[in-house]
Image (tube, grey):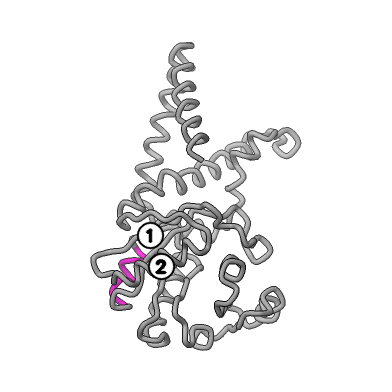
């Protein structure tokens, strides 16, 4: 949708894994070629974007070198990078450049799609020493054309940082939702906006998030340790009745969140 809106003269081809979905997708994108055959969908492609789950990105990506034109550039939208880049970096002779657009919601499927999803979102690119300069430039231009602001970092730095700012929040929302459900409280009847906002992302696809959390397990585990340490600090202050420590804990969080709001 973003490509069609911003580059209406470009030709877009779509692949769907289920043959029964072709007609539905074609009705939504009548101007695009739609196929459940990967070879047909990628024929004559200049740029291929893999927008599936992390494990599927790897399995599909391994099939592509034999299908694509020799000059085609490949990127992805996966939430973890080390495993994907390790798998695909050498398969395309420098023509693969990993990417992670920081956009989306807890919703999934075509009904959740909209053309301005990437407007002013950050897209993290993870080129390596094997990446061809023209491939990096092409991928950078593609994501900027879709509406993103791009930054670059190594796959390792990406996975460490995203464990904290993306993966830990999802794990925390899931843990909070499970704790509330187990508390015996009538959560649907009593929960206000704060609880709903905090746990919104827990409604995301369990299958997708299982792959993400398992694929970045070591980094997420470290982030969970940090969160537990912070909660234990607050718990100790609460048990001691230490109002000053409680206030400092909340003030530090509030100040950090204010900086985030001003930056956005």
Q: Which residue is mark 1?
A: 125
Residue 212 in the image: state x and y as whole percent.
Answer: 45, 57
Q: Position of residue 91 (x, y in %)?
A: 31, 77
- Using the rendered view, name the quadrant where residue 117 is placed: bottom right
Discs 1, 2 touching: Cβ within 8 Å: yes
**At which x and y percent is residue 95?**
34, 75
Q: CA distance from mark 1 to mark 2?
A: 8 Å
Seen in the picture, residue 127 relative to 249 is either above or below; the reply is below
Q: Nearer the viewer, residue 92 or 226?
A: 92
Taking 207 as reference, is 244 above or below it?
above
100 relative to 197 in the view: left or right: left
Q: Nearer the viewer, residue 110 or 130?
A: 130
Secondary structure of the magenta portion, mostly?
A: helix
What residue is drawn where x is 58% and y is 48%? 202
Relative to 232, 6 lies left or right: right
Determine whether 117 is above or below 238 in the image. Answer: below
Residue 210 - label? none
Is residue 18 one of those drawn in magenta? Answer: no
Mark 1 element type: strand
Residue at screen point 37% across, 35% down: 226
87 drawn magenta: yes
Q: Earlier in the sequence, mark 1 or mark 2?
A: 1
Which residue is at 48% across, 38% downward?
Answer: 263
Q: Residues within 10 Å of mark 2 (few under 14, many from 20)?
A: many
**Relative to the observer, which residue lies in front, 174 or 162?**
162
Residue stretch rendered in magenta on the structure: 83-91
Q: In front: mark 1 or mark 2?
A: 2
Residue underneath mark 2: 139
């Amino acid at each position: 949708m973003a490509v069609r809106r911003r580059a209406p003269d470009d030709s877009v081809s779509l692949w769907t894994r289920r043959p029964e979905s072709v007609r539905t997708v074609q009705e939504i994108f009548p101007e695009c070629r739609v196929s459940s055959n990967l070879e047909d969908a990628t024929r004559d492609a200049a740029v291929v974007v893999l927008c599936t789950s992390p494990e599927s990105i790897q399995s599909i990506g391994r099939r592509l070198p034999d299908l694509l034109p020799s000059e085609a550039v490949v990127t992805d939208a996966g939430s973890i990078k080390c495993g994907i880049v390790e798998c695909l970096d050498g398969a395309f002779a420098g023509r693969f450049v990993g990417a992670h657009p920081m956009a989306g919601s807890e919703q999934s499927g075509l009904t959740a799609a909209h053309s301005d999803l990437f407007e002013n979102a950050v897209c993290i690119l993870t080129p390596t020493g094997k990446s061809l300069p023209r491939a990096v430039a092409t991928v950078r231009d593609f994501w900027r054309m879709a509406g993103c602001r791009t930054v670059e970092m190594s796959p390792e730095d990406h996975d460490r940082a995203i464990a904290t700012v993306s993966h830990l929040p999802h794990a925390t929302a899931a843990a909070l939702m499970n704790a509330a459900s187990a508390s015996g409280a009538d959560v649907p009847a009593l929960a206000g906006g704060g609880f709903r906002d905090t746990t919104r992302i827990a409604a995301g696809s369990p299958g997708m998030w299982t792959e993400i959390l398992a694929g970045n397990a070591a980094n997420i585990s470290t982030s969970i340790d940090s969160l537990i340490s912070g909660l234990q600090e607050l718990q100790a202050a609460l048990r001691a009745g230490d109002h000053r420590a409680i206030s400092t804990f909340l003030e530090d969080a509030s100040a950090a969140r204010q900086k985030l709001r001003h930056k956005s």
